[in-house]
Image (spheres, rainbow, N blue to C red):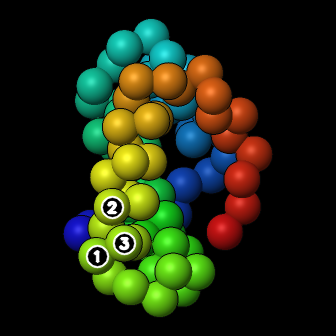
């Protein structure tokens, strides 16, 4: 798992827009920036590493397959 990368709102929204256009590179960059926060949030809520990893994988799939469902306004 890659560490947290600071990502300003404008850059995150630009990456999300590129993901919506099918840009796999933008997806990888965006997911690298958020994966640790998603994992830690899920682990804290679920209390189980394996369940948190499943949430992380599901989030990645959802982001790639349905990027329009992401508004880009979530906060850590």
Q: In which quarter of the view is residue 39 placed?
A: bottom left
- Compared with residue 45, is residue 29 higher up or lower down, i.e. above or below? above
Q: Quadrant of the C terminus?
A: bottom right
Question: Is disc 3 surrounded by few (<14), some (14 to 19) or many (20+) residues within 10 Å?
Answer: some
Q: Position of residue 4 (x, y in %)?
A: 42, 70
Asked whether the viewer can see residue 4, the reply is: no
- Compared with residue 45, is residue 8 higher up or lower down, i.e. above or below? above
Give the structural element (helix, strand or loop) at label 1: helix
Q: Residue at x 38, y 85 (%)?
A: 48
- Compared with residue 18, is residue 51 higher up or lower down, i.e. above or below? below
- Compared with residue 46, is residue 8 higher up or lower down, i.e. above or below? above
Question: Is disc 2 surrounded by few (<14), some (14 to 19) or many (20+) residues within 10 Å?
Answer: few
Q: Are marks 1 and 2 in contact (CB under 8 Å)?
A: yes
Give the structural element (helix, strand or loop) at label 3: helix
Q: Position of residue 65 (x, y in %)?
A: 40, 24
Please tell me which residue lies in front, 54 or 19.
54
38 relative position to 61: left or right: right
Q: In which quarter of the view is residue 71 placed?
A: top right
Pointer 2 residue: 54
Q: Are marks 1 and 3 in contact (CB under 8 Å)?
A: yes
Pointer 3 residue: 51
Q: Position of residue 29 (x, y in %)?
A: 34, 43
CA distance for labels 1 and 2: 6 Å
CA distance for labels 2 and 3: 5 Å
Q: Position of residue 8 (x, y in %)?
A: 62, 52
Q: Residue at x 49, y 65 (%)?
A: 38
Q: Are marks 2 and 3 in contact (CB under 8 Å)?
A: yes
Pointer 1 residue: 50
CA distance for labels 1 and 3: 4 Å
Q: Residue at x 45, y 10 (%)?
A: 21
Please tell me which residue lies in front, 45 or 64.
45
Asked whether the viewer can see residue 66, the reply is: yes
């Amino acid at each position: 798992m890659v560490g947290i990368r600071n990502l300003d709102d404008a850059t995150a929204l630009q990456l999300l827009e590129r993901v919506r256009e099918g840009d796999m590179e933008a997806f990888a960059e965006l997911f690298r920036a958020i994966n640790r926060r998603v994992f830690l949030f899920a682990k804290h809520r679920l209390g189980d590493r394996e369940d948190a990893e499943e949430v992380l994988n599901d989030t990645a799939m959802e982001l790639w397959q349905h990027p329009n469902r992401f508004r880009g306004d979530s906060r850590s």
